[in-house]
Image (cartoon, helix red, strand yellow):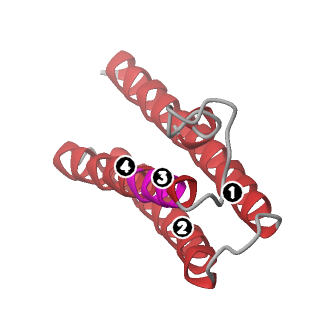
Amino acid sequence: MSENKNELNSLKDSVIERLKGSFSNLERAIVGAKERLAVTPDVDNKVIDRISQYELVLDKQKSIADALANSFAAGDFTEVARQVNLINNLSSMIIDDAKQIITGLQQNGGIKTSEPENDDFEWKDKLC
């Protein structure tokens, strides 16, 4: 019994640490995107607002991660799975929206990358 509890705690710690790492990466990507757009000429304020909304989504993800730790501790693995799914889907939403923004800006000449045929060239590592 004690061995199973230790394995469960190890799994919980591993999941939470991976999530924290993902949140840090996402936060850096959001900051990087805002900085990049701030120096990009003729970017519509609606685009900047969309990027700022990512911060709200990230805060929600962090809140769900806190609840996830409690669900793990309670042994409610159905809820753990649901919460992990929510976090992953919110991340996917941000990534998809960011790609749409980048593609739109590239098509309108707002962002140039060294490989224009690859719409997520500079952003891929930052957003995933």
Mark 1 lies on a secondary structure that is: helix
Dot placed on the residue nearer the N-terminal end, 1 or 4? 1
Disc number placed over residue 33 in the picture, else none = 1
Q: Amino acid at mark 2?
A: Tyr
Q: Which residues are magenta?
A: 96-104
The N terminus appears in which quarter of the rendering? Answer: top left
Cα distance between the residues tagged 1 and 2: 11 Å
Residue pictured at 70% horizontal, 75% vertical = 42
Q: Position of residue 78 (x, y in %)?
A: 16, 47
Cα distance between the residues tagged 3 and 4: 16 Å
Q: Amino acid at mark 3?
A: Thr
> What residue is disc 3 on?
103
* Left or right: 35 as drawn, with respect to 114: right
Residue 20 location, quadrant: top right
- Marks 3 and 1 close (CB-CB < 8 Å): no
Quick one: 2 or 51, which is closer to the camera?
Answer: 51
